Amino acid sequence: MESIRPENTDPIPLRPAPTQFVTIMIRFVGLLVVAIAILALVYSR
């Protein structure tokens, strides 16, 4: 039985790069602020 090996032998990164993590956090905080603003506008009416 033949063993199947990937062509790329680079190790799999266990966690994303810090810049990607910062981008995800900025997007999350931005969406959270938008959601709070929308809920505040709906609640104030």
Image: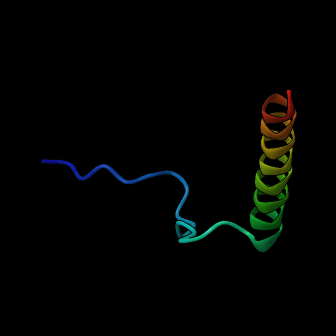
Asked where in the image residue 13 lies, by quadrant, the reply is: bottom right
Q: Position of residue 42 (x, y in %)?
A: 81, 29
| Image side of residue 14 versus residue 36, left or right | left
Quarter containing the C terminus: top right
Tally the marks: 0
Q: At 78% from the left edge and 34% from the top edge, which residue is drawn?
A: 43
Q: Position of residue 12 (x, y in %)?
A: 53, 66
Q: At 78% from the left edge and 40% from the top edge, which residue is drawn?
A: 35
Asked where in the image residue 40 lies, by quadrant, the reply is: top right
Query: Which of 31/38 is in front?
Result: 38
Query: Which of 7/10 is in front?
Result: 10
Query: Which of 24/7 is in front?
Result: 24
Q: Which residue is farthest front?
A: 45
| Image side of residue 26 versus residue 12, left or right | right
Q: Position of residue 14 (x, y in %)?
A: 53, 71
Q: Which residue is farthest left?
A: 1
Q: Position of residue 2 (x, y in %)?
A: 20, 48
What coloring was used for the rendering? rainbow
Q: At 87% from the left edge and 42% from the top edge, which residue is drawn?
A: 37
Query: Which of 26/21 is in front?
Result: 26
- Up the image or down, 15 lies above or below 42; here it is below
